[in-house]
Image (cartoon, helix red, strand yellow):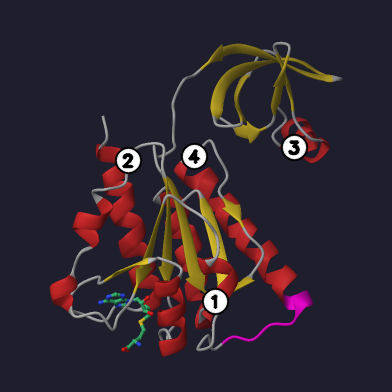
């Protein structure tokens, strides 16, 4: 069944002109056919009451929540070779609510303001297509591309800094993650291919971020991001 993002107003579903055109002239929907409409995290079964003008009436709210009970915010450094696009696609599937792309001292990619805006638009497209594939009812947000300092200054209930320089004896992600409760927000920060500078590690520590080891092996940046997102996806799904 076709699904569109739209707005439910007084028992009617409103979709934007592009989507309306696609529904009527490309999909050639007929009067009486059913479609699904997503409005701010809720899913509605609807019926096309008329195609000209397009009228879509709501039949019922199909209550199928898709979100984690914790707000997972993933800050990832821009990566070469489109590996950061993998982070967005898989992070969306794993339930990340918000992405913060950033540039740090060892990020290989350097962008001017125009390129940053273009890169962000591309990231949003990747997230949207992943939302459609994994049937999420909420579209994760992608913040503007930030500096490292701006990332670590943002406030969340918990903030974990994946630092590869920690000894694996301090492999404390499991114990730290267990402290996160439903309804709370958690910021996860992963470094670029070249890792974090001493200065960045100190700055994160001064801001009170919790440094965590992800184990005995050095993971690629994209692997580390998906590892952390998986931990909190698993944790979030385990809450009853
Ligand atoms: N400087 C690293 C090295 O020694 O080769 C490379 C950085 S690693 C490819 C990219 C990022 O993934 C790191 O900055 C860190 O955020 C995360 N990461 C990878 N392995 C990790 C580990 N075992 N513990 C904590 N963080 C890790």
Query: Is residue 194 visible in this depiction of the protein?
Result: no
Return the residue at label 4.
136
Return the residue at label 1.
78
Disc 2: CA contacts within 10 A as few (<14), some (14-19) or many (>=20)? some
User: Is disc 3 placed on a helix, strand or loop?
Assistant: helix
Q: Earlier in the sequence, mark 1 or mark 2?
A: 1
User: In the picture provided, is 208 more to the left or to the right than 119?
Assistant: left
Q: Earlier in the sequence, mark 1 or mark 4?
A: 1
Disc 4: CA contacts within 10 A as few (<14), some (14-19) or many (>=20)? many
Please tell me in which quarter of the rendered image ligand 1 is found.
Answer: bottom left
Please tell me in which quadrant of the rendered image residue 164 appears: bottom left
The residues bearing labels 3 and 1 have C-alpha atoms spaced at a distance of: 32 Å
Q: Earlier in the sequence, mark 3 or mark 1?
A: 3
Residue found farthest to the right: 53
Task: Name the front one of labels 1 and 2.
Answer: 2
User: Is disc 4 placed on a helix, strand or loop?
Assistant: loop
Name the quarter where the N terminus is drawn.
top right
Towards the viewer: 7 or 141? 141
Residue found farthest to the left: 169
Return the residue at label 3.
19
The residues bearing labels 2 and 3 have C-alpha atoms spaced at a distance of: 38 Å
User: Is disc 1 placed on a helix, strand or loop?
Assistant: loop
User: Is disc 2 placed on a helix, strand or loop?
Assistant: loop
Please report the residue visible at 61 percent of the width from the left and 63 percent of the height from the top: 123
Cβ–Cβ below 8 Å for labels 2 and 3? no
Give, as a single range, the part of the protein colored magenta: 109-115
Towards the viewer: 159 or 195? 159
Q: Which mark is residue 181?
A: 2
Residue 76 x/y as whole percent: 48, 69
Query: Is residue 171 visible in this depiction of the protein?
Result: yes
């Amino acid at each position: 069944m076709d699904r569109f993002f739209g707005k439910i107003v007084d028992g009617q579903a409103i979709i934007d002109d592009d989507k309306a055109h696609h529904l009527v002239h490309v999909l050639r929907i007929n009067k009486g056919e059913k479609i699904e409409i997503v409005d701010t995290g809720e899913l509605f079964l609807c019926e096309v009451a008329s195609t000209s003008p397009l009228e879509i009436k709501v039949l019922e709210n199909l209550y199928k929540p898709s979100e984690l009970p914790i707000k997972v915010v993933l800050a990832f450094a821009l990566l070469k070779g489109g590996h950061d696009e993998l982070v967005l696609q898989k992070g969306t599937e794993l339930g990340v609510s918000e992405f913060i792309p950033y540039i740090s001292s060892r990020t290989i990619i350097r962008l001017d303001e125009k390129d940053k805006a273009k890169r962000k638009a591309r990231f949003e497209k990747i997230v949207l297509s992943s939302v459609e594939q994994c049937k999420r009812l909420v579209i994760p947000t992608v913040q503007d591309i930030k500096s490292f300092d701006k990332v670590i200054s943002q406030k969340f209930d918990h903030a974990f800094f994946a630092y590869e320089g920690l000894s694996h004896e301090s492999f404390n992600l499991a114990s730290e993650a267990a402290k996160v409760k439903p309804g709370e927000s958690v910021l996860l920060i992963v470094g670029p291919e070249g890792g974090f500078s001493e200065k960045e590690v100190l700055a994160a520590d001064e801001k009170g971020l919790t440094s965590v080891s992800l184990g005995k092996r050095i993971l690629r940046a994209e692997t580390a991001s998906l590892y952390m997102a998986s931990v909190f996806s698993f944790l979030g799904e385990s809450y009853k």
